[in-house]
């Protein structure tokens, strides 16, 4: 089935009175903006909320099990979603993939409110809804893998080469890279790199054969830890480099106070941009469009203080921990 007119969806997405619930919204929103020019207002994101509520896992399958004690089959996740028409089982899977979102969000909303995290979540949703598709170019980034330091140098090379393969294929198909396969599947492929049968099960015979050859002939030497985040700060002046170091200390401090993971914090790329542009006021920080309004208000004063190399402990006392283990 091919829809001839999607204007109704555009009106729905833009309507501020109607709540739109997503799971891990940002890639979908960017893709829909790029492909159809849609605008988004009033969204909720159960994927982001799962991180803010410090769930053990962030997948929708996990959340359905956690909140409803229902185990969704993962069989159709690995089926061919490019073919038309889709199989009946695929259509049923696609429907079930969203049927639980509303009740999950209602339960999450209660938890966020109880733990004084709801306003932060709403602000982050607004930021996600405002995100625009990036310019065409190389989408390869190791920053997207929060546990990248835990992998071996060889595995990091294979992750990089898998991302190059995905990026090339996305260009040929005119798709966003995550629609070829997501980052979780990148890791699964790398872990299965010596097993042709497993690779075939994950991505099909043709891509499996290509990846198997890539893994047999990596594009370069193993990627060492010191090489990972070299790029964001490598072009900084000495003064900017000092600000970059202070901001990384600031980030570790916030992570410690809030007991939150690295993936919830500004990336090295964002920190390098802050170090270079060196905002002096909250308005200047806001104009950089790096953070939600909640973060500008609650993180902003300490960021500005770190940039100026002055104490900021008094600015971060009221931050709320998110790790449930410490409650």
Image: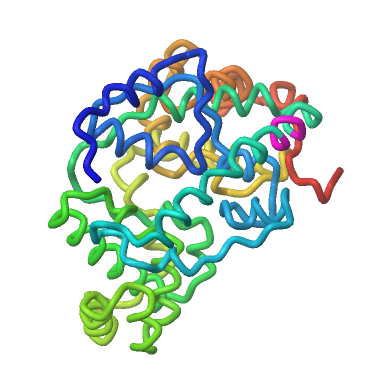
Q: Is residue 110 left or right of residue 180?
A: right
The quadrant holding residue 57 is bottom right
Residue at 69%, 32% in the rendered image: 106
Residue at 62%, 45% in the rendered image: 51
Vertical side of 107 occupied by 204: above or below: below
Q: Is most of the magenta stretch helix, strand or loop? A: helix
Specify the color scheme. rainbow
Q: Is residue 62 left or right of residue 77?
A: right
Vertical side of 42 occupied by 219: above or below: below
The region drawn magenta spans: 107-111
> Number of labelled discs?
0
Instruction: Residue 45 in the image: state x and y as whole percent.
Output: 54, 36
Residue at 43%, 15% in the rendered image: 15
Is residue 109 shown in magenta?
Answer: yes
Task: State the residue lying farthest toward the right.
Answer: 327
Vertical side of 207 occupied by 301: above or below: above
Instruction: Residue 261 in the image: state x and y as whole percent.
Output: 62, 49
Instruction: Residue 102 in the image: state x and y as whole percent.
Output: 61, 35
* Most foreground residue, 123 or 281: 123
Q: Is residue 129 left or right of residue 9?
A: right
Residue at 26%, 36% in the rendered image: 134
Instruction: Residue 41 in the image: state x and y as whole percent.
Output: 45, 19
The quadrant holding residue 82 is bottom left
């Amino acid at each position: 089935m091919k829809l001839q007119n999607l204007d109704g969806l555009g009106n729905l997405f833009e309507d501020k009175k109607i709540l739109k619930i997503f799971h891990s919204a940002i890639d979908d929103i960017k893709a829909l903006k790029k492909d159809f020019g849609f605008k988004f207002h009033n969204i909720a994101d159960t994927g982001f909320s799962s991180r803010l509520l410090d769930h053990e896992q962030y997948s929708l399958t996990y959340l359905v099990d956690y909140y409803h004690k229902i185990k969704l089959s993962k069989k159709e996740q690995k089926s061919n979603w490019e073919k038309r028409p889709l199989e009946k089982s695929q259509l049923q899977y696609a429907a079930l993939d969203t049927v639980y979102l509303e009740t999950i969000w209602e339960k999450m909303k209660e938890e966020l409110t109880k733990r004084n995290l709801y306003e932060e979540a709403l602000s982050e949703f607004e930021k996600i809804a405002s995100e625009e598709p990036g310019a065409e170019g190389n989408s390869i980034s190791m920053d997207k893998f929060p546990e990248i330091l835990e992998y071996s140098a060889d595995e990091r090379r294979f992750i990089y080469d898998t991302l190059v393969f995905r990026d090339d294929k996305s260009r040929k198909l005119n798709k966003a890279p995550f629609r070829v396969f997501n980052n979780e599947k990148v890791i699964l492929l790398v872990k299965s790199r010596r097993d042709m049968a497993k690779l075939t099960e994950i991505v099909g015979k043709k891509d499996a054969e290509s990846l198997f050859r890539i893994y047999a002939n990596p594009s370069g030497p193993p990627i060492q830890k010191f090489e990972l985040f070299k790029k964001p700060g490598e072009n900084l002046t000495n003064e900017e480099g000092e600000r970059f170091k202070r901001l990384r200390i600031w980030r570790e401090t916030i992570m410690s106070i809030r007991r939150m993971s690295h993936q919830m914090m500004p990336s090295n790329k964002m920190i390098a941009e802050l170090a270079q542009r060196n905002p002096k006021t909250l308005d200047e920080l806001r104009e950089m469009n790096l953070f939600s309004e909640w973060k500008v208000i609650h993180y902003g004063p300490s960021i500005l203080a770190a940039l100026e190399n002055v104490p900021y402990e008094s600015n971060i006392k009221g931050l709320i921990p998110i790790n449930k283990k410490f409650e």
